[in-house]
């Protein structure tokens, strides 16, 4: 065996091995053995680091190699929520607060007070209505009341892509959000956001347009028209964006500072397929101000090679991989919204009025206020613990592998529009009513943008190149070196037996 090992040492391409087969001093052999062990150990440590990196973080996010034109993505959906929640002659929140302190509320007034407290941000908080019996749940009468007392949005004029929209109010869709009744431009129909089991109040969130030409994963269809829904901008700049003028004519006592201390409008820009959450993100349009929002799209895509990786490794979901109960398509925001709904339903036996629900599910009243807050806290703790093994899978809301969002920069200035109107129309009665006008302009900042791509950090060829490169650097090992080992352990032994009658071959 020693002679056969010497034959291998004299023939192998692995560096250093031939010195083990030479008839040299023991000191030289020990020196080479130590050197070989050190090199092999260093090589092993580095290969282990590469394997660990390949196993733990196989996916990397980088910038795309080419720019994406604007027409590939939809114009952002714009949701506007008036801070005035009711017409005071129909429902006066301030008067109801004063009457309940004197214990003079009727049952109907008590119910209306509880309805409005769900929307108002008075300093003492929702539990201010403590001198009356708090309802644990509401019926659909809640939506009927909000619909009856709502303030008209006052969309006076609007334009898109440089062209005036004939009927501005028809461009906006009324939706129920956590801020009550809001109005959305360019949002998808409820049938393309929610599953069929979700209850909707009358025609709210109903969009009478074809909304099948775009989805998050594939984008717009190749054969879709330029003017298709959801709308898309063809060029950047304010002249190619969306502008809306908001005009509200109310008497001097109509604005209820008991309900909302800051007046004007809350606005959020979001993807057309996503439901807005005004309590989480928004910017304001103050009364008598002109606001400009400059938008930079943020798009991340994922290569098909990454789809073969485990979800935990790529840290994202493709829409088809995760099904939701209430929402038709998966997104991180939809998942978190559904988790909050499920926790609230399990804990309180009801859900908040803005959450998706089935027709049989009850709406939480003020009597469940503490329970709702505890449910929100429970979800927050689940989010904080999501990296632990004990967290439930349904509470892990990973991002979409292909996603779209919008970065916004806003600026605003006070708009003395009455002087302009006074120059054009001579009227002494201009101040007889408290009239407020505001404007919002939304536009894309650039014609093309750089998207991000999620792709594999190490493909099989990259992994083999790194693995083999380290072995070659430290030991000179290659695929042919492996074939030499296999050859000396199998083929050479068989051939030696056949040629020389013994497995070790000819002795040197």
Image: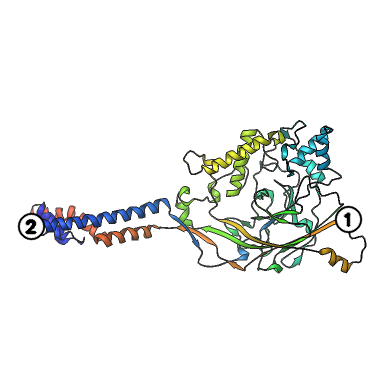
Front residue (pair 230, 126): 126
Residue indicated by mark 1: 433
Q: Is residue 483 left or right of residue 431?
A: left
Tell me if residue 477 can be seen.
no
Pick whichever, 236 or 478, lies toward us. 236
Residue under pointer 2? 506
On residue 271, the disc is none
Display colour scheme:
rainbow
- Residue lying farthest to the right in this orientation: 428
Q: Nearer the viewer, mark 1 or mark 2?
A: 1
Residue 9, given in percent of the width and then of the height, sits at 15, 58
Image quadrant in which you'd find residue 133: top right
**Which quarter of the figure is the C terminus placed in?**
bottom left
**Residue nearest the observer in this picture, 239 or 29:** 29
Mark 2 crowdedness (10 Å alpha carbons): few <14, some 14-19, many ≥20: few
Image-based side of 159 in relation to 14, left or right: right
Residue 229 percent coordinates (x, y): 68, 59
Crowding at label 1, few (<14), some or many (≥20) Cα neighbours within 10 Å? few
Which residue shows up at 22% across the image and 54% down it?
A: 37
**Is residue 467 shown to the viewer in this render?**
yes
| Residue lying furthest left | 508
Mark 1 secondary-structure assignment: loop
Q: What's the distance in space between the residues labelled 1 and 2, CA to CA?
A: 115 Å
Q: Residue at x 72, y 43 (%)?
A: 200
């Amino acid at each position: 065996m020693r002679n056969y090992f010497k034959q291998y040492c004299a023939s192998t391409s692995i560096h250093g091995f031939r010195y083990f087969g030479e008839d040299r001093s023991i000191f030289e052999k020990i020196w080479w053995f130590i050197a070989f062990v050190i090199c092999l150990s260093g090589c092993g440590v580095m290969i282990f680091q590469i394997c660990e990196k390949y196993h733990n973080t196989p996916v990397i996010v980088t910038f795309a190699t080419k720019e994406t034109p604007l027409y590939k993505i939809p114009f952002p959906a714009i949701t506007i929520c008036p801070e005035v929640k009711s017409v005071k002659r129909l429902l006066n929140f301030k008067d109801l607060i004063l009457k309940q302190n004197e214990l003079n509320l009727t049952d109907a007034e008590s119910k209306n007070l509880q309805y409005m407290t769900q929307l108002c941000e008075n300093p003492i908080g929702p539990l201010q209505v403590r001198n009356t019996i708090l309802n644990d749940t509401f019926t659909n009468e809640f939506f009927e009341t909000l619909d009856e007392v709502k303030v008209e949005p006052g969309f006076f004029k609007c334009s898109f892509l440089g062209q005036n929209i004939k009927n501005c109010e028809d461009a906006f869709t009324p939706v129920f959000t956590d801020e009550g009744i809001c109005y959305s431009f360019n949002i998808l129909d409820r049938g393309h956001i929610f599953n069929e089991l979700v209850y909707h109040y009358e025609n709210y969130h109903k969009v009478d347009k074809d909304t099948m030409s775009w989805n998050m994963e594939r984008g717009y269809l190749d054969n879709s028209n330029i003017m298709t829904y959801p709308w898309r901008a063809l060029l950047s700049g304010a002249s190619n964006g969306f502008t809306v003028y908001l005009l509200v004519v109310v008497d001097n006592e109509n604005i209820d500072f008991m309900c909302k201390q800051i007046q004007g409008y809350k606005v959020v820009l979001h993807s057309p397929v996503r439901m807005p959450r005004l309590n989480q993100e928004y910017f304001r349009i103050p009364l008598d101000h002109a606001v400009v929002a400059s938008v930079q799209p943020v798009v991340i895509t994922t290569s098909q090679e990454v789809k073969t990786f485990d979800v935990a490794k790529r840290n994202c979901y493709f829409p088809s991989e995760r099904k939701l109960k209430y929402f038709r398509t998966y997104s991180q925001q939809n998942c978190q919204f559904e988790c909050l709904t499920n926790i609230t339903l399990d804990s309180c036996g009801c859900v908040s009025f803005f959450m998706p629900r089935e027709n049989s599910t009850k709406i939480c009243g003020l009597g469940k206020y503490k329970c709702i807050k505890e449910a929100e806290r429970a979800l927050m703790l689940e989010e904080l613990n999501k990296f632990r093994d004990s967290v439930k899978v349904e509470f892990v809301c990973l991002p979409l592998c292909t996603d779209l969002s919008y970065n916004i920069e806003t600026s605003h200035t006070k708009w003395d529009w009455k002087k302009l109107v006074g120059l054009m129309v001579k009227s002494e009665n201009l101040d007889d009513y408290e009239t407020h006008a505001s404007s919002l302009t939304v536009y894309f900042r650039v014609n093309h943008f750089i998207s991000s791509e999620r792709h594999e950090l190490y493909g099989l060829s990259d992994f083999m190149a790194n693995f083999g490169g380290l072995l070659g650097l430290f030991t000179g090992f290659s695929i042919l070196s492996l074939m030499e080992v296999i050859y000396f352990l199998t083929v050479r032994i068989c051939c030696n037996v056949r040629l020389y009658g013994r497995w070790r071959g000819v002795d040197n």
